[in-house]
Amino acid sequence: MQNISKTFYNYKEAKMGRSNFEYSFNTIERCNMCQCSDIKVIGRRLNTSHGWNPGKKVGIATTVVQCSNCGLIFSNPMPVPSSFKDHYEVDPKRYWNEEYFEVDENYFSMEIKKLQEFTNGAPGLKTLDIGAGLGKQMFALRKVGYDVYGFEPSQSFCTMARKKFNFEKERLHCSTIEDAEFPTEFFDFISFGAVLEHLYDPSASIVKALGWLKQGGIIHIEVPSSRWMISRLLNLSYKLRGKDYVSNISPMHVPYHLYEFDLRSFYEHGSANNYKLKDYSYYVCDTFLPKFIDPIARQIMSRTNTGMQLCVWLQKEG
């Protein structure tokens, strides 16, 4: 587990129409992924989106740091809500954009093809979706014949997923990863799709998932990249205007990202936890740039591995 010092103060904040809730701010002494203590300050992050001129916004800021060894980005101190429900126990229609609820027949198809490549097309594999959200990944895996399981900590998300895709409670549990229980070496494939960046202890979460994974099994992880070019450019614009803000992570506002990861994070963590990095990709995703610049930016990000998302495939070693 990560090394966290004593809580030193709290504050209450109202978000998305909910009642006030309380944060504790915990000081981090070592990188969660590689345990390095050489952590450098890169700027500050408000409890609201920054925009072009964060200096004119009113809010509470936390310091953003980066591990000098593996490149992991996180806030220090780390804001921890008094309850997980403060962030995620909301109406799913208020958390996600409307188009997210549409079910694309090709959803997760690229990942399924990659999984089949790694497992030589073995049928009926047991799969686990950690942080299943609305259950779209489980649905896609079930369509091609996999034996699917999942868990989702938000009761509102879990309820909608069960109703939308007819998942039994035995297949889709409402649970946090800390409380989830499965047999040792039960699954062939486990996925953290856009989940690990929301977890306060990503290292321990990966290690726990490895215990549920068979020898030679595969873990798929998709996370925000600490190398994203647009974030770097925005940070540079702040610096040139004499502002000490950065655009990385969002620990106190939607989508509540606590970490951004570098490929080195998984190399370092894997060497200490009995897995190897089998494959990786960088996804460009949205650039949020004007249309006349967008195609050029996409080409640059694609060629330089500086897209928004990092996808890694890990394999448990014997």
Image: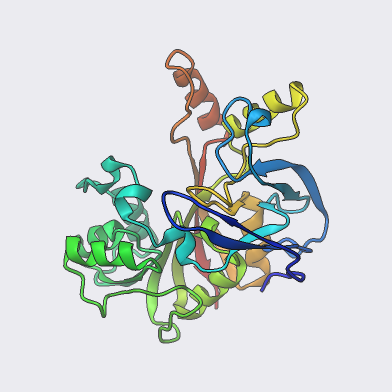
Q: Nearer the viewer, residue 66 or 109?
A: 66
Q: Nearer the viewer, residue 3 or 142?
A: 3
At x 43% / y 55%, what residue is drawn?
A: 18
Q: Nearer the viewer, residue 244 or 262?
A: 244
Q: Is residue 46 visible?
A: yes
Q: Residue furthest right?
A: 38
Q: Residue furthest top?
A: 292
For the N terminus, which image quadrant? Answer: bottom right
| Quadrant assignment, res 42 | top right
Q: How many marks?
A: 0
For the C terminus, which image quadrant? Answer: bottom right
Q: In screen coordinates, is 2 left or right of 213? A: right
At x 16% / y 67%, what residue is drawn?
A: 166
- Residue 63 drawn at (x, y percent): 73, 48
Which color scheme did the rendering employ for the protein? rainbow
Image position of 136 with respect to 84: above or below? above
- Residue 221 drawn at (x, y percent): 48, 57
- Residue 138 drawn at (x, y percent): 28, 63
Q: Residue furthest bottom?
A: 183
Q: In screen coordinates, is 172 left or right of 95? A: left
Q: Is residue 108 visible?
A: no
Image position of 88 with respect to 215: above or below? above
- Residue 285 drawn at (x, y percent): 44, 36
At x 18% / y 60%, what residue is drawn?
A: 164
Image position of 55 with respect to 112: above or below? above
At x 37% / y 58%, what residue is drawn?
A: 90
| Quadrant assignment, res 212 | bottom left
Q: Nearer the viewer, residue 45 or 274?
A: 45
